[in-house]
Amino acid sequence: MKIALFIFFCCISAFSQAQVWRSELPFSYESGNRLSISGNYKFGSDAITNEFAQAYFLNKFIGTELKDNVSSNLKEKNRFGADYNFNIEFRSEADTIMGISGASFIFNFSNRYFLDSRFPGDAFELYFRGNKMFEGQTADIGKFELNAFRYQQVSAGIEIQRSANKSSSCYALISLNRGIDYFGIRTNESSLFTAQDGFYMDLGLDMEIRQSDSLRRRFQGAGASLSAGWSAEFSSSSQLTAYFQNLGFINWGSRSAYIPVDTSFRFEGIDVSELFNFSDSVRGIVDNDSAYIQAFLTNRKKESFIMKTPARIGMNYYKKFDGDRMIAGAGIEHVLFYNTGFSGWTEFRYKTGKYHHTGVKLLYGLYGNLDAGLSYLLHIPGNFTVMLQSDYLVGMLTGSKGKAQGAFVSLSKTF
């Protein structure tokens, strides 16, 4: 029994994954070829704190205070997510493409990691504090979902800048996806009842587990994605942009594991009130390949399955003030198919001299709540551009209460 619940919850620590993050100045239409290298990471939750997540993923001591900080945030349903990116992009300007002027070829390579989950508050308490606190009660462990995977993309497409002053543009890319590994858990109605005297425990578990072939690490799945966007200026002082990114799929191969669990049974005969007490060290206790686990998860299959990639759709609007010295903007974005909420943001950018741009941003949504960030862009002689940005400074600077963090950095060269 202890092993079964350990499988159910320990997979929170499995993997992470990434998403496209294009972070460029509005009203920016550069001529020439350009090579860009960028990377970003972010973590967000409406319950899990930064300190707790760091201690868990780094296998550090998790004390009562760290748990209490999370428990004070818990609701009936909670969520968290993380993604990490590494991206190389090359744009090659062409005189014409199929008779269309102002066009450029785009080539892109991305390495992506993504983690997404929703979980009941009782599931956190049960796993990290044990079932003693639920004596005489039923703990809700249903409607749990975890998706953790990583993959790579190779993309190609075109960008077209129209009109004499290049005041509008559109782009489209198609990507080939190479799946590396995947782990997922989903439950329907599931619960755990612990008797008042700790003499028996009833478990009802309706769960399915999917995992890519653990013996193969180089190529687990294949698929494709599509990205496209459109941007236009109005009266040379305002700009509207709409886009969708990474709308596609990965088909994980026929050697992927599918493990359905639909069972109800009673564990009795000894004091079970401390059966799920993992103390303050919750990693590396149980071997997932042990004979006990193999016996419990008896219904194992090998079959392929299709997983949707985390696609983004969004729209933003920017307006210039005082020439091009100040720019204000706002936008909305949503990640499809996963457990994020809609996000909205507003931003103010200020040009401080010829080579410097700074910005401030307010953001609400995705996995967490209200946050704020800063950005800085530097133009270096030789046509180099460096950009540093974080949308989660409040979450990173609020100590034990912070529930989000992230950063973005890019270096580009125009030639």
Image: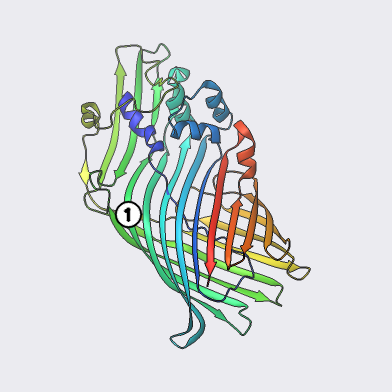
> Picture quarter containing residue 219?
bottom left
Q: Which residue is mark 1?
A: 179
In the image, residue 290 sits, relative to residue 299, either above or below, namely above
Vertical side of 181 occupied by 7: above or below:
above
Disc 1 is placed on an element classified as strand
Q: Among all residues in the image, which is located at the extreme right?
A: 322
Write the residue at 64% across / 70% down: 27
Say how the picture is coloured.
Answer: rainbow
Location of the N terminus by quadrant is top left
Relative vertical location of residue 125 with respect to residue 93 in this rendering, above or below: above
Residue type of the residue flagged with mark 1 = Gly
Tell whether 388 sits left or right of 110.
Answer: right
| Coordinates of residue 3 in the picture (x, y in percent) | 31, 26
Horizontal side of residue 257 vs 275, given as left or right: left
Q: How many marks?
A: 1
Picture quarter containing residue 322? Answer: bottom right
One can see residue 75 in this view: no
Residue at position x 53%, y 66% in the image: 413
Q: Taking the image as drawn, is residue 272 in sight?
A: yes
- Quarter of the image for residue 194 reads top left
Local crowd size for mark 1, using a 10 Å CA cut-off: few (<14), some (14–19), many (≥20): many
Residue 376 in the image, given as x and y percentages of width and height: 64, 55
Furthest-front residue in this view: 382
Q: Is residue 54 left or right of residue 223?
A: right
Residue 309 percent location from the top left of the image: 40, 56
Residue 403 x %, y %: 57, 38
* Closest to the observer, 329 or 4: 329
